[in-house]
Amino acid sequence: MAIIVKKFGGSSVSTIPKLKNIAKQILIEKNSKNNILIVLSAMGDTTDKLVVMSNKASKSPNPKDYDMLLSTGEQISVSLLSMILNDLGIEATSLTGWQAGIRTDSANMAARISNIDTKRIKLEFSKSRIVVVAGFQGIDSQKNITTLGRGGSDTTAVALAAALKAKECQIFTDVDGVYTTDPRICSKARKLEVLTYEEMLEMSGLGSKVLQLRSVEFASKYNVPLRVLHAHQEGSGTLIKKEEKKMEGALISGIAFTKDEAEVMIKGVKDEPGVAAKILGPIGEANIEIDMIVQNVGSNGLADFTFTVSRNTLKKALQVIDKKKKIMMYESVSSKSNIVKVSLVGVGMRSHAGIASKMFKCLAKNKVNIRMISTSEIKISVVIDQKNLEIAVQALHNEFKLEKK
Ligand code: ADP
Ligand code: ASP
Ligand code: MG
């Protein structure tokens, strides 16, 4: 029997009536003879509330306790849905991540799934039960509960789909598919019918949080067809799959953005070999991820070095730079946190020149100043001031004719 994995996100399971509506959908689908595995997020903003509670309880919560606390949200939703299904006469079992066999490394709050023992799930399937698994959590080799990073239920679903060789992994959420850009920022955003893993990897990696990046990495690695759908409306959603020859890549498939960027400028460093390593080495050692880097050659053998980091690591980065002043040997440091990154993504870019200049001209026409640029084969990213985010996204959406037809 084929297996279908269905994941429902927080806003889609925020109330009991919503859970009952999902159960009704399952009742209809139960006759299709597929084994159904459901992965749920915590209800509504439960996880946010748990984060607030932990911050009230402790200035720096112990990561193990923090994961223990955060993992409780998903246990509420799975147990409730399982009860509702059983009431409807559909045999169901709710399982925590560890009961479902999800083993992870020990990186609390951002653990990676290392392997999945599917024995228990298969046993439940053999009894014709629907299995409802708590997303976002697993267990490490020391039997500590871990969580997979915010948005991690997507990854639970795709990893289970890969391990069970499911026919499809369906991600149900509060939008009816993946759009050319976040429909909350651009009302003209258009739903995409199909997208390649590569394009979705770029979209997620560059900030489209409709799917957690790691879930797309899993899907791509194990070739799991992924479909994003609305949880409470009919529709075919967006299918994300391997690139096929006949899939004529759209020139631009979408515009992604991240709001959590920050810029660090180190002025007056020596313009000589090894300087980048001297600056970036200690930052990397402190586990701070650097995104874009620009070095401007100045005068008198000195240069300026600018790079971006995630906004929540800015403080730590500045502390490292201050501590390592003697090694880095700079004149001054400054930072700016009200910046954002906007990216154009599309596999069609590979075979088309001139996209970057069209993008830059469009931004100039709209008086949006570009602070930094980075490009790859299928994306162009710019860092701009936060106040220009909406103007930039909407102008680019128009310029590249991504709107609804
Ligand atoms: P869930 O709680 O179901 O996991 P998320 O909030 O994580 O849902 O993801 C859905 C949200 O992603 C949408 O409400 C939308 O605002 C946002 N989003 C960002 N970029 C896109 C995009 N390109 N297409 C669709 N939604 C997007
Ligand atoms: N509940 C977790 C979160 O809010 C995981 C998820 O929803 O995917 O991040
Ligand atoms: Mg999500």
Image (spheres, grey):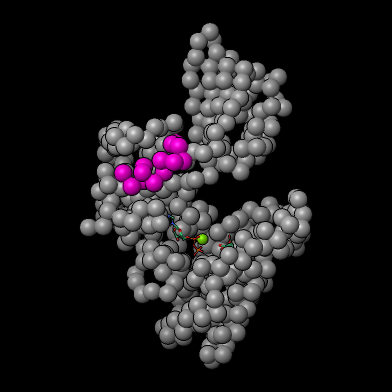
Compared with residue 303, is residue 228 higher up or lower down, i.e. above or below?
Answer: below
For the question of whether residue 129 can be seen, the reply is: no
Q: Residue at x 69, y 54 (%)?
A: 108
* Viewer-nearest residue: 41 or 214: 41
Residue 367: percent from the left, percent from the top? 34, 34
Residue 360: percent from the left, percent from the top? 32, 34
Q: Residue furthest top?
A: 300
Whether residue 390 appears in magenta in the rendering, the answer is yes
Q: Residue at x 50, y 23 (%)?
A: 295
What's drawn in magenta, residue-wise?
A: 383-395
Left or right of 368 on screen, residue 207: right
Quadrant occupied by the C terminus: bottom left
Q: How many marks?
A: 0
Residue 62: percent from the left, percent from the top? 77, 54
Compared with residue 1, is residue 286 higher up or lower down, i.e. above or below?
Answer: above
Most common secondary structure along the magenta stretch = helix
